[in-house]
Image (cartoon, grey):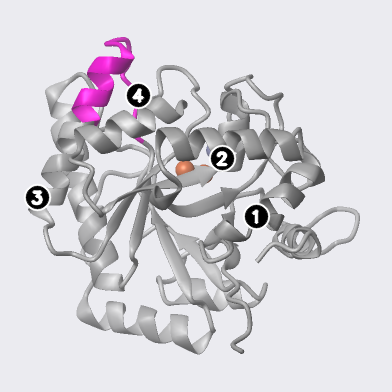
Protein backbone atom coordinates (compact mmCIF):
# COMPACT_ATOMS: atom_id res chain seq x y z
CA UNK A 1 0.00 0.00 0.00
CA UNK A 2 1.31 3.42 -0.86
CA UNK A 3 1.59 5.87 2.04
CA UNK A 4 -1.29 8.33 2.37
CA UNK A 5 -0.76 11.35 0.18
CA UNK A 6 0.06 14.43 2.14
CA UNK A 7 -0.55 17.81 0.60
CA UNK A 8 0.07 20.34 3.29
CA UNK A 9 2.26 23.41 3.50
CA UNK A 10 2.35 27.18 3.40
CA UNK A 11 2.74 30.20 1.20
CA UNK A 12 6.44 30.68 0.46
CA UNK A 13 8.46 33.68 -0.64
CA UNK A 14 10.04 33.71 -4.11
CA UNK A 15 12.61 36.35 -3.14
CA UNK A 16 15.77 35.57 -5.09
CA UNK A 17 13.90 33.48 -7.67
CA UNK A 18 10.99 31.05 -7.89
CA UNK A 19 13.20 27.94 -7.54
CA UNK A 20 13.97 29.00 -3.96
CA UNK A 21 10.34 28.60 -2.82
CA UNK A 22 10.25 24.78 -2.79
CA UNK A 23 13.52 24.82 -0.85
CA UNK A 24 12.03 27.19 1.73
CA UNK A 25 8.95 24.97 1.97
CA UNK A 26 11.03 21.85 2.47
CA UNK A 27 12.55 23.42 5.58
CA UNK A 28 9.07 23.06 7.14
CA UNK A 29 8.39 19.64 5.54
CA UNK A 30 5.86 21.23 3.19
CA UNK A 31 4.48 18.95 0.50
CA UNK A 32 2.41 21.82 -0.90
CA UNK A 33 3.31 25.48 -1.33
CA UNK A 34 1.81 28.64 -2.75
CA UNK A 35 3.80 31.35 -4.52
CA UNK A 36 3.44 34.68 -6.25
CA UNK A 37 4.99 34.58 -9.71
CA UNK A 38 5.79 38.31 -9.57
CA UNK A 39 5.65 41.15 -7.08
CA UNK A 40 1.97 41.10 -6.14
CA UNK A 41 1.77 44.81 -5.35
CA UNK A 42 3.05 46.12 -8.70
CA UNK A 43 1.58 46.17 -12.19
CA UNK A 44 4.83 45.34 -13.98
CA UNK A 45 4.67 41.95 -15.70
CA UNK A 46 7.46 39.53 -16.34
CA UNK A 47 7.82 36.41 -18.39
CA UNK A 48 9.11 33.10 -17.13
CA UNK A 49 12.01 31.81 -19.22
CA UNK A 50 12.40 28.17 -20.14
CA UNK A 51 15.41 27.94 -17.85
CA UNK A 52 13.42 29.28 -14.91
CA UNK A 53 10.54 26.89 -15.62
CA UNK A 54 12.92 23.95 -15.65
CA UNK A 55 14.76 25.10 -12.53
CA UNK A 56 11.47 25.52 -10.66
CA UNK A 57 10.22 22.05 -11.60
CA UNK A 58 13.57 20.51 -10.69
CA UNK A 59 13.50 22.29 -7.34
CA UNK A 60 9.96 21.02 -6.63
CA UNK A 61 11.06 17.43 -7.35
CA UNK A 62 14.31 17.71 -5.44
CA UNK A 63 12.59 19.02 -2.32
CA UNK A 64 9.65 16.61 -2.39
CA UNK A 65 7.05 19.35 -2.85
CA UNK A 66 4.25 17.73 -4.82
CA UNK A 67 1.65 20.46 -5.06
CA UNK A 68 1.96 24.14 -5.89
CA UNK A 69 -0.53 26.96 -6.23
CA UNK A 70 0.03 30.44 -7.51
CA UNK A 71 -1.80 33.47 -6.10
CA UNK A 72 -2.48 36.35 -8.45
CA UNK A 73 -1.53 39.99 -7.90
CA UNK A 74 -3.66 41.96 -5.45
CA UNK A 75 -4.08 44.80 -7.97
CA UNK A 76 -6.11 42.77 -10.45
CA UNK A 77 -9.83 43.54 -10.38
CA UNK A 78 -11.78 41.85 -13.16
CA UNK A 79 -14.95 43.45 -11.75
CA UNK A 80 -13.66 47.04 -12.00
CA UNK A 81 -16.35 49.36 -13.38
CA UNK A 82 -13.76 51.49 -15.25
CA UNK A 83 -12.75 50.10 -18.64
CA UNK A 84 -9.08 51.02 -18.24
CA UNK A 85 -8.57 49.22 -14.96
CA UNK A 86 -10.55 46.24 -16.22
CA UNK A 87 -8.41 46.00 -19.38
CA UNK A 88 -5.23 46.34 -17.35
CA UNK A 89 -6.51 43.65 -14.99
CA UNK A 90 -7.31 41.27 -17.82
CA UNK A 91 -3.89 41.76 -19.39
CA UNK A 92 -2.23 41.14 -16.04
CA UNK A 93 -4.41 38.09 -15.33
CA UNK A 94 -3.50 36.56 -18.71
CA UNK A 95 0.17 37.04 -17.86
CA UNK A 96 -0.45 35.29 -14.52
CA UNK A 97 -1.92 32.25 -16.31
CA UNK A 98 0.98 32.13 -18.77
CA UNK A 99 3.57 32.29 -15.99
CA UNK A 100 1.80 29.41 -14.23
CA UNK A 101 1.92 27.35 -17.41
CA UNK A 102 5.63 28.09 -17.86
CA UNK A 103 6.35 27.06 -14.26
CA UNK A 104 4.14 23.95 -14.33
CA UNK A 105 1.75 25.38 -11.73
CA UNK A 106 -1.67 23.79 -12.25
CA UNK A 107 -3.84 26.21 -10.23
CA UNK A 108 -4.00 30.00 -10.23
CA UNK A 109 -5.83 31.24 -7.13
CA UNK A 110 -7.44 34.65 -7.56
CA UNK A 111 -9.84 37.01 -5.82
CA UNK A 112 -12.93 37.65 -7.94
CA UNK A 113 -12.69 41.40 -7.39
CA UNK A 114 -14.74 44.30 -6.09
CA UNK A 115 -17.70 45.92 -7.80
CA UNK A 116 -16.94 49.35 -6.27
CA UNK A 117 -20.54 50.50 -6.03
CA UNK A 118 -21.94 49.07 -9.27
CA UNK A 119 -23.73 46.24 -7.49
CA UNK A 120 -22.96 42.56 -7.06
CA UNK A 121 -24.84 41.30 -10.10
CA UNK A 122 -23.02 43.73 -12.42
CA UNK A 123 -19.70 42.85 -10.80
CA UNK A 124 -20.25 39.13 -11.22
CA UNK A 125 -21.14 39.57 -14.88
CA UNK A 126 -17.91 41.49 -15.48
CA UNK A 127 -15.74 38.92 -13.71
CA UNK A 128 -17.44 36.05 -15.54
CA UNK A 129 -16.81 37.81 -18.86
CA UNK A 130 -13.15 38.30 -17.94
CA UNK A 131 -12.81 34.64 -17.01
CA UNK A 132 -14.45 33.52 -20.24
CA UNK A 133 -12.04 35.66 -22.23
CA UNK A 134 -9.07 34.41 -20.22
CA UNK A 135 -10.05 30.78 -20.80
CA UNK A 136 -10.45 31.44 -24.49
CA UNK A 137 -7.12 33.21 -24.86
CA UNK A 138 -5.24 30.56 -22.87
CA UNK A 139 -7.06 27.59 -24.34
CA UNK A 140 -5.21 24.34 -23.89
CA UNK A 141 -2.96 25.59 -21.10
CA UNK A 142 -3.07 23.20 -18.14
CA UNK A 143 -3.86 25.90 -15.60
CA UNK A 144 -7.10 25.97 -13.60
CA UNK A 145 -8.55 29.28 -12.45
CA UNK A 146 -9.38 28.79 -8.77
CA UNK A 147 -11.76 31.45 -7.46
CA UNK A 148 -10.93 32.23 -3.84
CA UNK A 149 -13.78 32.47 -1.35
CA UNK A 150 -13.71 35.94 0.22
CA UNK A 151 -14.67 37.51 3.53
CA UNK A 152 -16.89 40.14 1.91
CA UNK A 153 -14.95 43.23 2.93
CA UNK A 154 -16.13 46.40 1.24
CA UNK A 155 -17.67 45.63 -2.13
CA UNK A 156 -15.66 42.48 -2.78
CA UNK A 157 -17.41 39.61 -4.56
CA UNK A 158 -17.17 35.92 -3.76
CA UNK A 159 -18.37 35.95 -0.15
CA UNK A 160 -21.38 33.71 -0.80
CA UNK A 161 -21.51 30.28 -2.40
CA UNK A 162 -24.13 31.66 -4.77
CA UNK A 163 -21.56 34.18 -6.05
CA UNK A 164 -19.12 31.34 -6.72
CA UNK A 165 -21.79 29.34 -8.55
CA UNK A 166 -22.80 32.35 -10.66
CA UNK A 167 -19.17 33.11 -11.53
CA UNK A 168 -18.53 29.52 -12.63
CA UNK A 169 -21.78 29.33 -14.61
CA UNK A 170 -21.25 32.76 -16.14
CA UNK A 171 -17.76 31.75 -17.25
CA UNK A 172 -19.06 28.68 -19.02
CA UNK A 173 -18.77 26.06 -16.24
CA UNK A 174 -15.76 24.43 -17.94
CA UNK A 175 -13.31 22.05 -16.29
CA UNK A 176 -10.64 24.74 -15.78
CA UNK A 177 -12.83 26.61 -13.28
CA UNK A 178 -12.40 25.74 -9.62
CA UNK A 179 -12.53 27.05 -6.09
CA UNK A 180 -9.90 27.78 -3.45
CA UNK A 181 -11.59 27.58 -0.05
CA UNK A 182 -10.07 30.04 2.44
CA UNK A 183 -11.20 29.01 5.93
CA UNK A 184 -10.71 32.48 7.45
CA UNK A 185 -12.64 34.16 4.67
CA UNK A 186 -15.59 31.73 4.71
CA UNK A 187 -15.84 31.96 8.51
CA UNK A 188 -15.68 35.77 8.40
CA UNK A 189 -18.28 35.80 5.63
CA UNK A 190 -20.79 34.30 8.05
CA UNK A 191 -20.48 30.50 7.95
CA UNK A 192 -19.30 29.53 11.42
CA UNK A 193 -16.54 26.91 11.07
CA UNK A 194 -15.73 26.66 14.80
CA UNK A 195 -17.72 23.45 15.38
CA UNK A 196 -18.01 20.06 13.73
CA UNK A 197 -21.67 20.78 12.96
CA UNK A 198 -20.81 24.15 11.44
CA UNK A 199 -18.19 22.59 9.18
CA UNK A 200 -20.57 19.79 8.14
CA UNK A 201 -23.35 22.26 7.34
CA UNK A 202 -20.97 24.50 5.40
CA UNK A 203 -19.83 21.71 3.09
CA UNK A 204 -23.37 20.37 2.62
CA UNK A 205 -24.31 23.82 1.37
CA UNK A 206 -21.15 24.12 -0.69
CA UNK A 207 -21.84 20.78 -2.35
CA UNK A 208 -25.45 21.67 -3.09
CA UNK A 209 -24.72 25.16 -4.42
CA UNK A 210 -21.28 24.87 -6.03
CA UNK A 211 -20.34 21.16 -6.01
CA UNK A 212 -17.47 19.60 -4.05
CA UNK A 213 -15.94 18.55 -7.37
CA UNK A 214 -14.99 22.21 -7.96
CA UNK A 215 -12.67 22.33 -4.93
CA UNK A 216 -9.03 22.69 -6.01
CA UNK A 217 -7.31 23.85 -2.83
CA UNK A 218 -7.59 25.18 0.69
CA UNK A 219 -6.10 28.18 2.42
CA UNK A 220 -5.89 27.16 6.08
CA UNK A 221 -6.05 30.29 8.20
CA UNK A 222 -7.63 30.88 11.56
CA UNK A 223 -9.59 34.11 11.88
CA UNK A 224 -9.01 37.09 14.19
CA UNK A 225 -12.55 38.49 13.92
CA UNK A 226 -15.89 36.82 14.72
CA UNK A 227 -17.85 34.72 12.21
CA UNK A 228 -19.95 37.06 10.13
CA UNK A 229 -17.71 40.10 10.76
CA UNK A 230 -16.75 40.19 7.06
CA UNK A 231 -13.34 41.39 8.20
CA UNK A 232 -10.35 39.54 6.71
CA UNK A 233 -7.64 39.15 9.38
CA UNK A 234 -5.71 35.90 9.50
CA UNK A 235 -4.78 34.34 12.85
CA UNK A 236 -2.48 31.45 13.80
CA UNK A 237 -4.11 28.02 13.78
CA UNK A 238 -6.06 27.37 16.97
CA UNK A 239 -5.72 30.93 18.26
CA UNK A 240 -8.63 32.51 16.45
CA UNK A 241 -12.40 32.34 16.26
CA UNK A 242 -12.32 29.08 14.24
CA UNK A 243 -10.13 27.29 16.77
CA UNK A 244 -8.85 23.75 16.95
CA UNK A 245 -12.29 22.08 16.86
CA UNK A 246 -13.03 23.58 13.46
CA UNK A 247 -9.68 22.54 11.98
CA UNK A 248 -10.03 19.06 13.52
CA UNK A 249 -13.36 18.64 11.73
CA UNK A 250 -11.73 19.68 8.45
CA UNK A 251 -8.80 17.33 9.03
CA UNK A 252 -11.16 14.41 9.63
CA UNK A 253 -12.94 14.87 6.32
CA UNK A 254 -11.03 12.48 4.08
CA UNK A 255 -12.61 13.93 0.94
CA UNK A 256 -10.23 16.86 1.31
CA UNK A 257 -7.10 14.77 1.89
CA UNK A 258 -5.83 14.86 -1.73
CA UNK A 259 -6.25 18.63 -2.11
CA UNK A 260 -3.36 21.07 -1.58
CA UNK A 261 -3.71 22.97 1.71
CA UNK A 262 -1.53 25.96 2.50
CA UNK A 263 -1.18 28.32 5.42
CA UNK A 264 -1.32 32.08 4.89
CA UNK A 265 -0.78 32.93 8.54
CA UNK A 266 1.69 35.56 9.75
CA UNK A 267 5.39 34.63 9.43
CA UNK A 268 8.32 35.15 11.73
CA UNK A 269 9.25 33.63 15.07
CA UNK A 270 6.74 32.82 17.80
CA UNK A 271 7.98 35.03 20.68
CA UNK A 272 7.26 32.27 23.21
CA UNK A 273 8.76 29.16 21.62
CA UNK A 274 11.19 31.14 19.37
CA UNK A 275 10.25 28.72 16.56
CA UNK A 276 9.04 29.94 13.16
CA UNK A 277 5.27 30.36 13.08
CA UNK A 278 4.96 28.17 9.96
CA UNK A 279 6.55 25.30 11.89
CA UNK A 280 4.24 25.88 14.87
CA UNK A 281 1.09 26.12 12.74
CA UNK A 282 1.94 23.10 10.61
CA UNK A 283 2.67 21.05 13.70
CA UNK A 284 -0.75 21.97 15.11
CA UNK A 285 -2.45 20.89 11.90
CA UNK A 286 -0.49 17.64 11.71
CA UNK A 287 -1.45 16.85 15.31
CA UNK A 288 -5.09 17.24 14.30
CA UNK A 289 -4.48 14.66 11.58
CA UNK A 290 -4.44 17.16 8.70
CA UNK A 291 -2.98 15.60 5.57
FE1 LIG B 1 -6.08 35.34 -1.39
FE1 LIG C 1 -6.44 33.18 1.13
ZN1 LIG D 1 -7.40 36.79 3.77
106 left or right of 142? Answer: right
Q: Residue furthest left?
A: 137
Q: Are marks 3 and 4 in contact (CB under 8 Å)?
A: no
- Whole-angstrom CA distance, mark 2 to mark 1, is 10 Å
What label does residue 203 carry, if any? 2
88 left or right of 179? Answer: left
Position above or below: 48 against 203: below
- Whole-angstrom CA distance, mark 4 to mark 2, is 25 Å
Indicate the position of residue 141 as horizontal and vertical percent values: 18, 64
93 left or right of 205? Answer: left
- Please give the name of the residue rendered at 48% of the width and 60% of the height, measured from the top-left corner: 34
Question: Closer to the N terminus: mark 4 or mark 1?
Answer: 4
- Pointer 4 residue: 114
Closer-to-camera residue (146/264) = 146
Q: Is residue 233 visible?
A: no
Question: Closer to the N terminus: mark 2 or mark 1?
Answer: 2
Question: Closer to the N terminus: mark 4 or mark 2?
Answer: 4
Question: Closer to the N terminus: mark 3 or mark 1?
Answer: 3
Amino acid sequence: MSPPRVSLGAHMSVAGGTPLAPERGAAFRCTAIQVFTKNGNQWGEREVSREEGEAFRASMARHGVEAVLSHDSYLINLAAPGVDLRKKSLRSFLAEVRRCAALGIPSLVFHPGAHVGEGEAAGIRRVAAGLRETLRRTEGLPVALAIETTAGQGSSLGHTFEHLRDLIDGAGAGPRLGICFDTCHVHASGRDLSTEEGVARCFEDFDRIVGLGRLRAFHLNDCKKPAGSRVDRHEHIGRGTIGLAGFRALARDRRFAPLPKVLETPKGPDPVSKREWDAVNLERLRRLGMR
